[in-house]
Amino acid sequence: MRFTHRAETFPVNTPAAAQIFTVVLSQGPLTRLELARRAGLSPAAVTKAVRPLIEAGYLVEDADEEARPALGRPANLVRVDGGRALFLGIKVTGDEIIGVLTDLCCRIRAARHVPLTDRDLKVVLAATADVVQELLVEADGLGVGVLGLGIAVSGDVDRGAGVVRYSPFLEWRDVPLAELAATTTGLPVTVDNDVRALTVAEQWFGAGAGLSDFAVVTVGAGIGCGLVVHGKVVAGAHGVAGEIGHVTVDPAGPLCHCGNRGCVEAIAGDAAILRRIRETTGVDVPDTASAVRLARRGVPGAREAYARAGEAIGRGIATVANLLGPERVIISGEGLAAHDLFAEQIRDAFAAAAFGSAAQCDVQTRPLPFEEWARGAAATAIQSFIRADTQGAP
Amino acid sequence: MRFTHRAETFPVNTPAAAQIFTVVLSQGPLTRLELARRAGLSPAAVTKAVRPLIEAGYLVEDADEEARPALGRPANLVRVDGGRALFLGIKVTGDEIIGVLTDLCCRIRAARHVPLTDRDLKVVLAATADVVQELLVEADGLGVGVLGLGIAVSGDVDRGAGVVRYSPFLEWRDVPLAELAATTTGLPVTVDNDVRALTVAEQWFGAGAGLSDFAVVTVGAGIGCGLVVHGKVVAGAHGVAGEIGHVTVDPAGPLCHCGNRGCVEAIAGDAAILRRIRETTGVDVPDTASAVRLARRGVPGAREAYARAGEAIGRGIATVANLLGPERVIISGEGLAAHDLFAEQIRDAFAAAAFGSAAQCDVQTRPLPFEEWARGAAATAIQSFIRADTQGAP
């Protein structure tokens, strides 16, 4: 098990340098001039930050062949060498651990799934160590150092402290997961809420790159939401934020596990859809795949359950748009496998409930393979790596 | 009509200096050391910014008599000399113009109300010029320059462009108000949405000072919301944000002017409360004052209308808390005159609908004299004054 410690090799130690590297990573390749403009810094600051990063191999500068002017030198483009470093991302769910090995540009190089028979902390830590070990062997084959590990968990996670405050799904309370996983793996560890981690991946490497205000809405077992406002992920002063699943759609609706009635999640979460189909059709649908088959076959009760779910999600998204006015909302999650069954209802309910020009918000869907959750965790590790030496500065 | 142009006298021309002055203005008096800590800058940067500001009379440094140590020199405290400059704030409503003269610390020195018989742009501009003229005479008596004018209007306002995009109340579309008012008054003009202006006043001079995440909820004719996230007021990518009034409380509820049913505003706005009381009691209540009297007398239909309003407001606030996790929510607005009639329902509905630790959010109420709206406008003028020479920098 080998890895290079970041501090020895990564020449980013000021907020300006971290800012410049982040802009290249999320929006590059860019000319130096455009980089200075987007980072809001002087060309001199860019030159100062870029030189040691090129020397250390994190950035490369190529002639832009496509943009070659008729006369004169072509403009050079600065980009990140994704192969220069590797990172690990782990998503812990109730029944499995998913791990990915990514490069510095968060491209997945290898993935592993390990079933989880127990949610006990020791069992989870041991399984995590196994997945990490397997992925480190893969990394060894690539001959590049692994510089960080991200772990994503659903629930209330204090990223700064590295502590899982409360994860109802895992039945964990106040678990210092970052410290424990750092001890078992020997890697620098970042722990974050799973939806926020996915949001970081979209912000840096996805449909949110370059946007200062957007939302990610995840549809599946739960209905989650990650928010980026003024360029930063919203964490909530008390650890709660993005709870679109508990926006009320209908105060007379079905009871939610949170104690209220008619929350988005109580209508559009996987379990809620199954319950509704059972109630209206009398068929004992065992899982989401059967529910989707039933609805696609045109069974009215099943179709109606998905239509109601779509309407609830559309209203939830409109609430986010009305309060925050994001440029874009990215709908994602395993639940998108049933997208054909509720896309129209999401769109119509959003359009009806969006207030004035909030309806101009660009609502996109993005299929989400399960590895994406683990990739989100890797994105948080990349983020921590870039910022590690610049903490405490403004 | 005299005023001093800012550029001649205000020695703030870098983002760091603006940041330092803002921290003293909103959180001072402070020692230089504490100021450096809160601004996230070095003591040297503080010394560099503070010296010319003291020389120009905007800052003063006093010995802190209360904190005098038993031995040694007392720590000096830096504070803003509020009397060093004056600003004007104007709120335009459907039937009057309210103007205030404030000092640099946004303390009201004089106020004027002028009734408005017409919402035509020319009439409003002429009335604004009259109010400005009267307040400039007051300022003349104080012998200090007026350095800026803020104008607050309800609706979709593009502050950066100085344009009222759409104000349903005034029936204005795409009015370049900042430019027009600058021409008629000769002052630098800032135009902003009224709720956002009030939020700026709370952020700099009120219950939001020093907080990075909070919300202002205004209760009255409409139900509005100003949001501060990561230390900045949320404006919305498409001009819409903070539309708590259009959060759905009950999809089977009363029709809202936005076309949906059961919005917070359709239940808790002044007109909605009057309508509900008329429906349930048969009494033709002419205005809010009569409605409040009826409810205080214990008439069941009137009490119930206020109770429903409180519940809707509480649910709306819980939605904000669940999505953004603010540290504090400040409830304000003319509607607070009826606070005794719905405070309990706001509190209970918030507690029931807040998800997990979002319930820890500190919900406060703050009475709002009508001049406060104009004071909010003055706060935006003070903000523009401080930032004017630092625009374009990051």
Image (spheres, coloured by chain):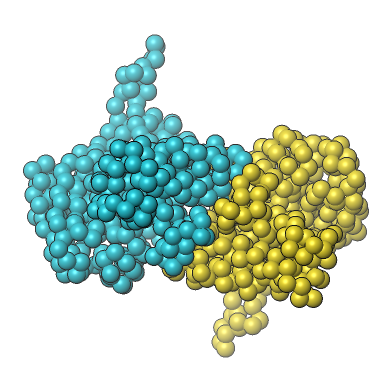
Chain colours: A cyan, B yellow
| B251 versus B283 height, above or below | above
Q: Position of residue B166 (x, y in %)?
A: 70, 39
Quadrant of the snapshot with the N terminus of chain A = bottom left
Count of marks placed on residues: 0
Residue at x 29%, y 27% (from the top left corner):
A62
Residue at x 57%, y 88% (from the top left corner):
B70
Indicate left or right for A339 with A113 as reference. Answer: right
Front one among B119 and B221 = B221
| B214 versus B115 height, above or below | below
Residue at x 65%, y 53% (from the top left corner):
B254
Front one among A107 and A303 = A303
Q: Position of residue B206 (x, y in %)?
A: 66, 65
Q: Quadrant of residue A300?
A: top left
The extreme front residue here reads A282
The extreme top residue here reads A70
Front one among B288 and B128 = B288
Q: Position of residue A251 (x, y in %)?
A: 52, 60
Residue at x 27%, y 54% (from the top left corner):
A284
Residue A315 visible in rendering: yes
Q: Position of residue A149 (x, y in %)?
A: 23, 55
Residue B211 visible in rendering: no
Indicate left or right for B27 with B139 as reference. Answer: left
Front one among A293 and B212 = A293
